[in-house]
Image: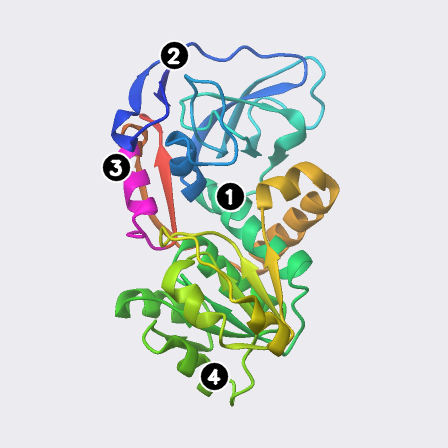
């Protein structure tokens, strides 16, 4: 079978599309034929050796897949061959066949699109955990979302609206601002004079919660527009610069800075994660959340697609599709 293989940590161009052995089926594992494979920002960091986790090389990157069960181990009880499922893996997703432990595999509701299922796991899972467990977002509060046209940004907008919040979306271009508005944002702005814009839109009070997957200059401005008792969520650093916080601001404004590491959350609190996924799938079926799938691309094009994601050139969710699907 074909897969994208990271032979050694390095530039994305060094990824290889080649044949590998089909993973064996063990007692507690499920073999899946993917219909869609999610592309995520951490995948690109992992390949370059820049992520918190560093698996032994060679390895196949990719953390989320959705497709059809081909075979199950003797101890697997929750799914059977022919079922459509989604699975969250640490690695192994960029492949024509994926093996996953049964504990990370869940059945898909009838009719759920495989690409949507991928988006709900990492992008929506991150934003949901950030807003629900880390920020404890309340109805009527104001949330500002940086990087609002990215996969996690769109997810944050829709989840916040489902939770009853007001949303100010921040995006860098007219096209991205349009997508953020269509995703449900109440107001949409650009990055110019960001602090002043956020202050003006909150009548000088400042925002209750800030969702920041960008870092860099945007963080420098936004951390000065927090309201008293606010929560500044650190999601990531897509700008490429990890900013420094003037901690005197947190003293004077009495706001909290809260880290969000979704991967750690899923490992340490699997039952809470499972509850979150049930809520997200319920919202999906009710039409409260709907991923924006920008495109579906051949598995062989993974290096080019990862470059777009890491270069902030993508909007919404991008997925890979194995040949013949």
Alpha carbon separation for disc pair 1 and 4? 36 Å
Crowding at mark 1 (Cα within 10 Å: few <14, some 14-19, many 20+) = many
Q: CA distance from mark 2 to mark 1?
A: 26 Å
Q: Which of marks 2 and 3 precedes in the sequence?
A: 2
Q: Which residue is mark 4?
A: 199
Residue 228 seen in render: no
- So how many labels did they put on this image? 4
Q: Earlier in the sequence, mark 2 or mark 1?
A: 2
Tag on residue 304? 3
Q: Secondary structure at mark 3?
A: helix
Q: For the residues carrying marks 3 and 2, which lies nearer the camera in this image?
A: 3
Q: Percent from the top left, x then y, of residue 135?
A: 64, 63
In the depicted view, which residue is nearer to us: 229 or 245? 245
Whichever of labels 4 and 2 marks the residue nearer the N terminus, that label is: 2
Q: Quadrant of residue 265?
A: top right
Q: CA distance from mark 3 to mark 4?
A: 39 Å
What residue span does the magenta drawing correspond to? 303-315
- Could you tell me how far apart the alpha carbons at marks 4 and 2 are, in whole angstroms? 54 Å
**Secondary structure predominantly adopted by residues drawn in magenta:** helix
Using the image, determine if residue 231 lies above or below residue 82.
below
Query: What residue is disc 1 on?
Result: 117
Q: Earlier in the sequence, mark 1 or mark 3?
A: 1
Secondary structure state at the residue bearing disc 2: loop
Residue 253 at x, y percent in the picture? 61, 77
């Amino acid at each position: 079978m074909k897969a994208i293989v990271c032979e050694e940590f390095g530039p994305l161009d060094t990824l290889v599309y080649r044949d590998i052995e089909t993973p064996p089926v063990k007692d507690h594992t499920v073999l899946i034929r993917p219909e869609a494979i999610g592309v995520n920002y951490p995948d690109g960091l992992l390949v370059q050796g820049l992520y918190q986790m560093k698996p032994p090389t060679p390895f196949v990157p990719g953390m989320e897949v959705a497709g059809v069960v081909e075979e199950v181990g003797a101890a697997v009880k929750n799914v059977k061959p022919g079922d459509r499922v989604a699975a969250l893996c640490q690695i192994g997703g960029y492949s024509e066949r994926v093996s996953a432990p049964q504990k990370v595999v869940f059945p898909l509701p009838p009719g759920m699109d495989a690409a949507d299922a991928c988006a709900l796991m990492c992008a929506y899972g991150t934003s949901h955990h950030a807003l629900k467990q880390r920020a404890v977002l309340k109805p009527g509060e104001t949330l500002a979302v940086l990087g609002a046209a990215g996969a996690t940004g769109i997810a944050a907008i829709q989840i916040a609206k489902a939770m009853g919040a007001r949303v100010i979306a921040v995006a860098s271009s007219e096209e991205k601002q349009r997508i953020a508005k269509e995703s449900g944002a109440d107001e949409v702005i650009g990055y110019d004079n960001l602090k002043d814009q956020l202050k003006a839109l909150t009548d000088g009070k400042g925002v209750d919660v800030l969702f920041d997957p960008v870092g860099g200059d945007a963080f420098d401005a936004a951390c000065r527009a927090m309201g008293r008792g606010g929560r500044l969520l650190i999601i990531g650093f897509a700008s490429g610069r990890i900013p420094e916080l003037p901690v005197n601001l947190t003293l004077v404004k009495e706001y909290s800075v809260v880290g969000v590491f979704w991967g750690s959350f899923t490992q340490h609190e699997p039952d809470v994660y499972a509850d979150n996924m049930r809520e997200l799938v319920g919202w999906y079926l009710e039409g409260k959340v709907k991923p924006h799938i920008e495109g579906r691309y051949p598995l062989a094009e993974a290096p080019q697609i990862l470059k777009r994601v890491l270069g902030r050139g993508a909007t919404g969710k991008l997925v890979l599709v194995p040949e013949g699907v």
